Image (tube, rainbow, N blue to C red):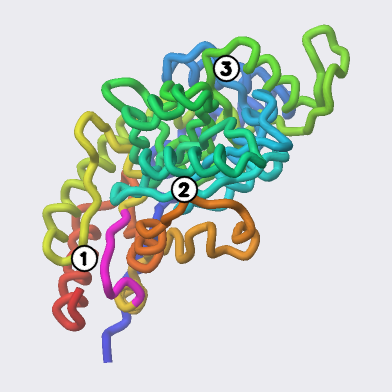
Amino acid sequence: MMPEPSSKLPLIDLAAQRAHLAGRIEAAIAGVLAHGQFILGPEVAALEHAIAGHVGVRHAIACASGTDALVLALLARGVGAGDAAFVPAFTFAASAEAVALAGAVPVLVDVGGDFTLDPASLAEAVAAIRRAGALRPRAVVTVDLFGQPARYEDILPVARQEGLFVLQDAAQSFGASWQAEPVGRQGDAAALSFYPSKPLGAYGDGGAVLTDDDALAERVRSLARHGIEQDGLHGRIGANSRLDTLQAAILLAKLPALDQERAARAAIAARYADGLRGLVEVPRARAGIEHAWSCYTVSSGRRDALAQGLAARGIASAIYYRRPLHQEPAYARFPRAPRLAVAEALAGRVVSLPMHAYLEPRDQARIIAAISSLVSEKGS
């Protein structure tokens, strides 16, 4: 019988991060408690200014979640009924959910071996929608999955040729870069998530829309605040999607550590690649990319056995995602690209290992040794 593990290794260790940043986080919370402006306090505007400056965009509009950020950007651009928005089939449901909530139709396209949207599949899907004639191709929601920026060098030419609004789902990639350009600047707008496990995580939900488009930013801000415009009138039907002041303060306290934490995750990813090569298929950053490494996701033909074996040894793992979206009941009715073979294959092979900036080398060595043992026992 296998001995009980002496300690459990979590997938993401938020407690370890808090131990390193506790002083500044607690001071930020105390500041909000002192001034009592819990809704739209000064920290919200300060966070928006800081994030816009970090990315190098004109506007960052904070909102209540990453999903809301996607919906608000689409609504602000006027994407809705009769429109098609193209979304990778291998992603979290929110990427397609936002399209449907905006009133448009998500069209599911394939991904490549780097987990991000396949530009050739996008072009095929756009052509198929145009031939069918029932929908107008209006937008593409790129997804920087697991922290790797999508292939914008190939996606943007397709989008420009087809007149598509490019909405960058950067929920997992904040802090990364594409061709020396910070993530969040590649599309017409970008959506961030501040869910606790994200590269910049709050202690609750939160999100933001990034854009250089002044008119789009004004509409996003209005939509997020009940449709109120600068003159105080309700100029449109909006929603309540404000970021709480406490969450903004926590994020402001964490933001200075973002680049250092990304570098630490990159070093951990390099150690994983060295230790796991030949045991499982390891992810690689494309040339010209600084990966955020929000997840470290490997592939194996014995994925389920590997995950079970790690759990028995007290090591957490996660499977993102067991089914591509076109195999999920809520999304099976939507149109799709002619082929989704890569998305289907990845769904049966991927597993994410513990990854966070404070993962100790000894704990990582334990994970690598466990995988080596499991592969030796059962084959990869």
Tag 1 residue? 366
Tag 3 residue? 46
Asked whether 254 falls inside the magenta stretch, the response is no
Q: Is mark 2 on a helix, strand or loop?
A: strand
Q: Which residue is drawn at 31% across and 52% down?
A: 296
Q: Which residue is drawn at 59% across and 44% down?
A: 132
The magenta stretch is: 297-304
Q: What element carries label 3?
A: helix
Q: Is residue 134 visible?
A: yes
Q: Which residue is drawn at 60% across and 61% down?
A: 332
Q: Quick one: label 3 or label 1, which is nearer the N terminus?
A: 3
CA distance separating discs 2 and 1: 38 Å
Position above or below: 344 against 231: below
Q: Which residue is drawn at 38% across and 46% down?
A: 146
Q: Quick one: label 2 or label 1, which is nearer the N terminus?
A: 2
* Residue 210 % position (x, y): 53, 22
Answer yes or no: do the residues labelled 3 and 1 have beta carbons within 8 Å? no
Position above or below: 293 against 278: above
Tag 2 residue? 109
